[in-house]
């Protein structure tokens, strides 16, 4: 199968700053991937190279098996969706959506039908005669998406598409955007620094740092099985327990924390070289009893409780002296208070070893 997009050993620098350091990856036709990382990691540079706004210093870029070397931006069948929409304020919604069609020489009689199709796709039928300043932020973003899709691009590039919206609207439009991408079947590359956005939109995530792809894979694999400390920390809050592996029996190792807490973890090839355990707060369960059967259990005392929307983050000092945070559902029938005696438990498979 020919890849929709492929980078082979691509490098790009701006002066002394290395934006991309010899990276290689491919995207399957119809797939949506998310490029995730902090500012300056190189993710937007990837989009600019694909779109033709920049040229690579080394390596090759192909779209649909065709080399992009020497092709100008307008010669590439690529749709663009920017953070700030870039709508023409003097044009109506219909004129904005049809702009790319007119620019590419589509027959004038065909444009209204295609524009109407796009308005229906993004649920803005009846808004065609309005101007951008008469629309909400979410509606403007839908118009920008419709314009990007109107020309039937083989590839859609989305650069921080929802970051200018408030949290509630971002959540709503994530679902809508995912539905639209599925409906049209376009290959899409989403650039974002938002972990939730990447995990909800991307079939695969590429976590980047300093011009390199640190890890790629399905969202759950990257989140629950990070391959580096950077990925573990960047993907979300995590507990780090310092210590060492003291014994290994087949597929299970025994880890002892600095304070003497011993518990089983999945064995690693590096064995005794492992010095830390990473466990997500969501994997740490709190109970007033003995904990869940088959899980690692330890008595402790609640130090602090912070409510964050649907979750409570409960800080616990264990009887071993270790400290750990649990993220549990914020339910009206369950509460925890500072000083409360509890038991924490976590499944061994949730514990990831690091050197």
Image (cartoon, rainbow, N blue to C red):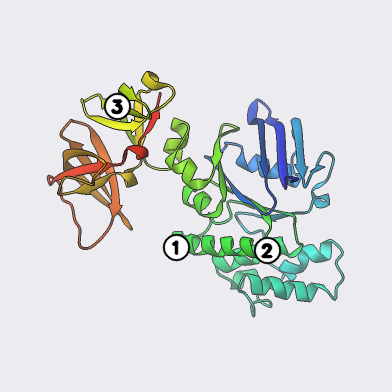
- 224 relative to 11, above or below: below
Q: CA distance from mark 2 to mark 1?
A: 25 Å
Question: Given this view, does label 2 or label 3 mark the residue nearer the observer?
Answer: 3
Identify the residue at image location x=60%, y=32%. Answer: 211
Q: Which residue is mark 1?
A: 168
- Residue 297: percent from left, percent from top: 21, 39
* First-in-chain label (2 vs 3): 2
Query: Is residue 256 in view from this perspective?
Result: yes
Left/right of residue 298 with respect to residue 109 in the rendered view: left
x then y, percent, for residue 198 = 52, 49
- Residue in the foreground of this view, choosing between 124 and 272: 272
For marks 3 and 1, give the one nearer the viewer: 3
| Residue at the disc numbered 3 | 255
The C terminus sits in image quarter: top left
Return the residue nearer the eye: 116 or 219: 219
149 left or right of 242?
A: right
| Residue closer to the observer: 98 or 69 | 69
Residue wearing tag 2: 184
Any part of residue 131 in sight: no
Q: Is residue 107 left or right of residue 287?
A: right
The front one of 75 and 200 is 200
């Amino acid at each position: 199968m020919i890849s929709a997009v492929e980078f082979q050993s691509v490098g790009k620098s701006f002066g002394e700053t290395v934006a991309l350091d010899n990276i290689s990856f491919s995207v399957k036709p119809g797939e949506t991937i998310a490029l995730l990382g902090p500012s300056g990691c190189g993710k937007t540079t990837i989009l600019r190279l694909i779109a033709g706004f920049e040229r690579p210093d080394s390596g090759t870029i192909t779209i649909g098996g065709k080399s992009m070397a020497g092709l100008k931006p307008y010669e590439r069948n690529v749709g663009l969706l920017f953070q700030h929409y870039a709508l023409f304020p003097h044009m109506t919604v219909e004129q904005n959506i049809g702009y790319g069609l007119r620019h590419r020489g589509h027959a004038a009689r065909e444009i209204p039908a295609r524009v109407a199709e796009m308005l229906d796709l993004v649920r803005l039928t009846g808004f065609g005669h309005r101007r951008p300043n008469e629309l909400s932020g979410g509606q403007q973003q839908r118009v920008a998406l419709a314009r990007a899709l109107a020309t039937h691009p083989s590839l859609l590039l989305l650069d921080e598409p929802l970051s200018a919206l408030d949290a509630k609207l971002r959540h709503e439009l994530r679902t809508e955007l995912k539905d639209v991408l599925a409906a049209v079947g376009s290959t899409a590359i989403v650039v974002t620094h938002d972990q939730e956005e990447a995990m909800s939109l991307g079939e695969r995530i590429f976590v980047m740092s300093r011009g390199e792809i640190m890890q790629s894979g399905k969202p759950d694999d990257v989140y629950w099985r990070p391959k580096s400390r950077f990925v573990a920390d960047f993907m979300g809050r995590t507990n780090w327990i310092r210590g060492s592996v003291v014994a290994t029996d087949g597929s299970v190792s025994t880890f002892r924390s600095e304070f003497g807490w011993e518990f089983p973890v999945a064995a690693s090839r590096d064995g005794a070289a492992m010095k830390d355990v990473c466990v997500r707060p969501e994997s740490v369960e709190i109970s007033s009893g003995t904990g869940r059967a088959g899980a690692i259990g330890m008595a402790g005392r609640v130090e602090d409780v912070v409510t964050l929307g649907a979750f409570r983050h409960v800080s616990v000092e264990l009887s071993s002296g270790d400290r750990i945070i649990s993220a549990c559902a914020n339910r009206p029938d369950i509460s925890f208070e500072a000083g409360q005696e509890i038991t924490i438990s976590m499944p061994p498979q949730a514990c990831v070893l690091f050197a």
